[in-house]
Amino acid sequence: MDFVLVLLIQVISIYRYVIIINIILSWFPQVRQSGFGRFISTISEPFLEPFRRIIPSIGMFDFSPIVSIFALEFAIIGIDSIRSFI
């Protein structure tokens, strides 16, 4: 069971980096339209969409990726605390 929880923590950590890459790619529209950019968007947008519905953009700034990274971090903390009890 410990292996599964550690693997889940690693997958969530990698997903955090995918969201950070998505944030960086949003600054470069040409790269975002490339195959790599579309792949990153395809992976990250389904997770970011519920946060975008809850948190409105303020002007040009979209804070939903930051909130989603916090949510993933809280998930890691929760899984790690469950792992410490097992």
Image: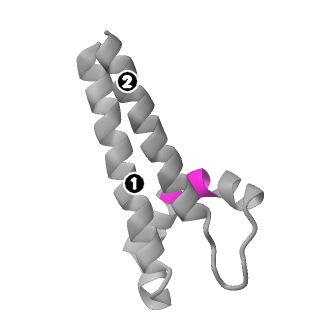
Q: Amino acid at mark 2?
A: Ser
Indicate which disc residue 31 carries. none
52 vs 68, left or right, is right
Using the numbered discs, state the Cα–Cα distance from disc 2 to disc 1 in whole angstroms: 19 Å
59 vs 31, left or right, is right
Q: Secondary structure at mark 1?
A: helix
Q: Residue farthest to the left?
A: 3
Q: Which residue is mark 1?
A: 16
Residue at 33 percent of width and 41 percent of height: 11
**Is residue 58 visible from the viewing direction of this image?**
yes
Quarter of the rendering containing residue 54? bottom right
Q: Amino acid at mark 1?
A: Arg
Nearer to us of marks 2 and 1 is 2
Q: Residue farthest to the top?
A: 86
Quarter of the rendering containing residue 64? bottom right
Q: Magenta span has 46?
A: yes
Q: Which residue is mark 2?
A: 81
Q: Magenta span has 11?
A: no
Query: Which of the image's four quarters has the N terminus?
Result: top left
Q: Which residues are magenta?
A: 44-48
Q: Which mark sits nearer the N-terminus, 2 or 1? A: 1
Residue 4 spot, x, y in % from top left: 30, 21
Query: Which of the image's four quarters has the C terminus?
Result: top left
Residue 29 spot, x, y in % from top left: 50, 88
Residue 30 spot, x, y in % from top left: 45, 90
